[in-house]
Image (cartoon, rainbow, N blue to C red):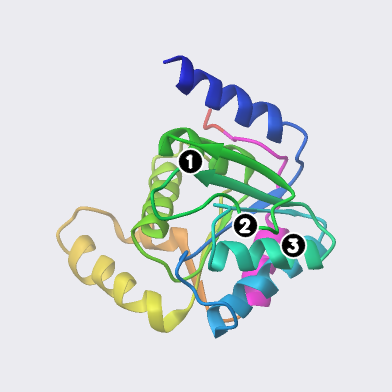
Amino acid sequence: MLRIQSEFVEGFGALAGLGPAISVFGSARTKRGSERYLQAERIGELIASAGVAVITGGGPGAMEAANKGAVNGGGVSVGLGIELPFETGLNEWVDLGVNFRYFFARKTMFVKYSQGFIVLPGGYGTLDELFEALTLVQTEKVTGFPIVLVGTAYWTPLLDWLKNTVVEEGAISPPDLDLIRLTDDIEEAVDIMVNSARPNGFVAAD
């Protein structure tokens, strides 16, 4: 219990003065120099150039690329790391970093200090973060929280499954699909985030 409490205290303390921020998610397995790596790097740079901080999971791959882009864009580069057996600490482009043992404490920080999520192709961890955000918006635990998926070829099969299976089963409603924006245009993805800027912090429903 004390370790859990200390993680929340450390996270809140480190990020309290952050200002507006956008979280960028994507695979830790994204290769340096690949098209997706370069996309994440450019996204980080565009966000930083708009005067908004970039938050990632602090690891390698797409996370590293977005942090690198934030630094190159002259902005604040934040990494919220997690202790995992196959990842070795925060990447070199993180300016402000916090390491967590517990996923739930880490995810609280992503939602509390982000004004929205840009989600690049990724695996279980990326999907976990995506659906956590969708659940919070759907249940109105947070408001004004845009979620943009980048990569139509990658994400369309998932969205088709949600539409043709999950909606058809009645497990979600058709308007729930409108919570997600899909694009291949990284400038559009960043514009959606910047134009929906809200005061920093968790916006709870009334």
Residue in view at x 21 percent, y 71 percent: 164
| Image: 32 above or below 181 | below
Q: Residue at x 20, y 53 (%)?
A: 171
Tell me the amino acid under the disc marked 3: Ala
> Which numbered disc flags the more N-terminal residue, 2 or 3?
3
Tell me where residue 96 appears, x and y as whole percent.
Answer: 72, 44
Picture quadrant where residue 161 is located: bottom left
Magenta residue span: 186-203
Disc 2 crowd, CA 10 A, few/some/many (<14, 14-19, 20+): many
Q: Position of residue 23 (x, y in %)?
A: 60, 54
Q: Is residue 143 above or below residue 43?
A: above
Camera-side residue of 92 and 120? 92
* Residue to which mark 1 is pinned: 107
Residue 57: % across, % down: 54, 52
Between circles 1 and 2, the one closer to the viewer is 2
Residue 111 against residue 75 in the figure, above or below: above
Q: Nearer the viewer, residue 92 or 8?
A: 92
Question: What secondary structure is found at the residue carrying circle 1?
Answer: helix
Mark 1 is surrounded, within 10 Å at the Cα level, by few (under 14), some (14 to 19) or many (20 or more) other residues, namely some
Distance, label 2 to label 3, CA atoms, is: 13 Å
Residue under label 2: 91
Task: Decide if residue 126 is on the left or right side of residue 68.
Answer: left
The secondary element bearing badge 2 is classed as loop
Name the residue beneath numbered marker 3. Answer: 70
